[in-house]
Amino acid sequence: MNTLKKTLSLDPDNWNDLRALGHRMVDDMFDYLQQIGEQPAWKAPTDDVKAHLAQPLPLEGQPAEAVYAEFLRYILPYNNGNIHPRFFSWVQTTGTPLGMLASGMTPNVTIGDHAAMYVDKQVIDWCKALMNFPENASGMLVSGATMANLTSLLVARHTADRDRIRRYGVRGTDRPLVLYASAETHSCVQKAVEVMGLGSEALRKVPVNASYQLDDTALQSMIEADLAAGLHPFCVVGNAGTVNTGAIDPLDAIADLCQQYNLWFHVDGAFGALAKLVPAYAHSLAAIERADSVAFDLHKWLSMPYEVGCALIRNADLHRDAFAMTPTYLARHERGLAGGPDSLSNYGIELSRGFKALKVWMSFKTFGVDRLGAVIAQNIEQAQYLAQRINDEPQLELLAPAPMNIVCYRFNPRDGRDTDALNALNKEILMRLHEQGIATPSYTLLGGRYAIRVAHVNHRTQLADLDILVEGSIRIGGELIR
Ligand SMILES: *Cc1c(COP(=O)(O)O)cnc(C)c1O
């Protein structure tokens, strides 16, 4: 007898059951997002949670409903909290409810003639328009500004010695390559320089002024000194919004020096480049339009759900030159699925890529860039309000200028405590702000002084949320010194 065995598949036996569960998931997620402000800003994962998430590899499956119940109990309530109106840590997105479709389609957005490739291209074209880059520039959606900086710097490195780098690597260059960035530059740039095989010493850290902006006179002297020493300066990284304080480097002066010395001008604009959408910042960010490349995130100030960042390269040929590689199994055909656009593997490190572009496409179309820009303007206004409130409170002290959306402050009772004591006090205040679920600012050291740091890219925040943070800081500080 023919005992035909049922084919194994990972699809459900009963689509209706799974559909019902799916509807519940969507409903639960919308309830969660709608009511998040009523929850504490942070809740520590309990020991029970940690134990539950340290179990042996499951060999047998269980019903999806049961797994979902565990998700609701052990995972969802202990979220990072970056979706909360009083989340101000690092520089993290607040997300929007529109990012939930791409995994259902799950196309590989690298190669082939299918819609996702054109959505990706559409989004890159919109990114060029945002940054006022020429239409014939190229670009790549990547996981974030870290990868966008690396991608851009790889093109810069390739361009520095086009005939040799790809073949012989950095040991094939006749003069050692060096590049420049301010001392306030994000650590991912140093990581990129290390990954590229240049070594961290190749990254020259240019001093900053009192406003944490790169000192362009010092930059020029450093370039001259390196040239005199027989090195090969090839690139300067300018900041459009530093991670610590939101400082914007003198981008025009950097662009001038890059022109004079024939250096690649790259801008790390992870969040700050998006302030281009706010008229008051258009002038100080205009020189992004002179850059050879710019890196920025869509998952910071454009509120996209993780992950998505963008690298734009002015010269598409140089971009392709730095990465292109076409094995037989990736060759493009005239027609059929293997027709379509140039494989995106020719423009970056990755081969397989997810459909990051869909959430961006949906968000841009749904909200419109005017509204996204208005949120950015609102965040800057709110940050300025916070800075003013801190200035008005005798027990609080601003620790750096707040030129944009980052506010660094500390509690200072001005009772003769030295720096170490104030640092310890403010670190304790920060941890208690988190533990009490009040708000989640982050932290940094500025000139050795511990700063509570509000990096504000949160579209859910109201002014009252900032008042709660100010009052919480003063109350906890007062309790600690009593
Ligand atoms: C966040 C940030 C980065 C790194 O971006 P990721 O998206 O986290 O990889 C780089 N530079 C600056 C200025 C940043 O704020």
Image (spheres, helix red, strand yellow):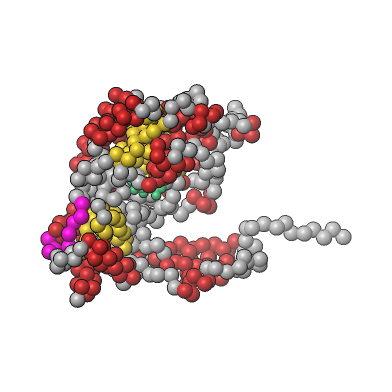
Where does residue 76 sit, x and y in percent of width and height?
Answer: 44, 66
Per the rendered image, the range of residues in magenta is 392-400
Residue 461, percent across and down? Answer: 27, 59
Quadrant position of the C terminus in the picture? bottom left
Please give the name of the residue rendered at 34% of the width and 30% of the height, measured from the top-left corner.
Answer: 226
Asked if residue 397 is among those painted magenta in the image, a careful observer would answer yes
The residue sitting at 20% across, 52% down in the picture is: 400
Q: Quadrant of the N terminus?
A: bottom right
Taking the view exactly as shown, the residue that stands out farthest to the right is 1
Q: For the view shown, which residue lies furthest in the front direction?
A: 229
Residue 218 makes an appearance in the image: yes
Residue 108: percent from left, percent from top: 55, 43
Depth check, front residue: 288 or 194: 194
Total numbered circles = 0
Tell me if 295 is positioned left or right of 66 in this view.
Answer: left
State the image coordinates of residue 436 (x, y, percent, origin top left): 31, 72
**In terms of depth relative to the viewer, which is nearer, 359 or 89?**
89
- Above-or-below relation of 477 to 347: below
Horizontal side, residue 11 vs residue 349: left or right: right
Query: Is residue 274 covered in magenta?
Result: no
From this viewpoint, is residue 88 visible?
A: no
Is residue 323 rendered to the left or right of residue 91?
right
At 24% from the left and 37% from the top, the residue drawn is 215
Task: Please tell me which residue lies in front, 54 or 340.
Answer: 54
- Residue 397's quadrant in the figure? bottom left
Q: Look at 21% across and 36% down and name the residue there.
A: 283
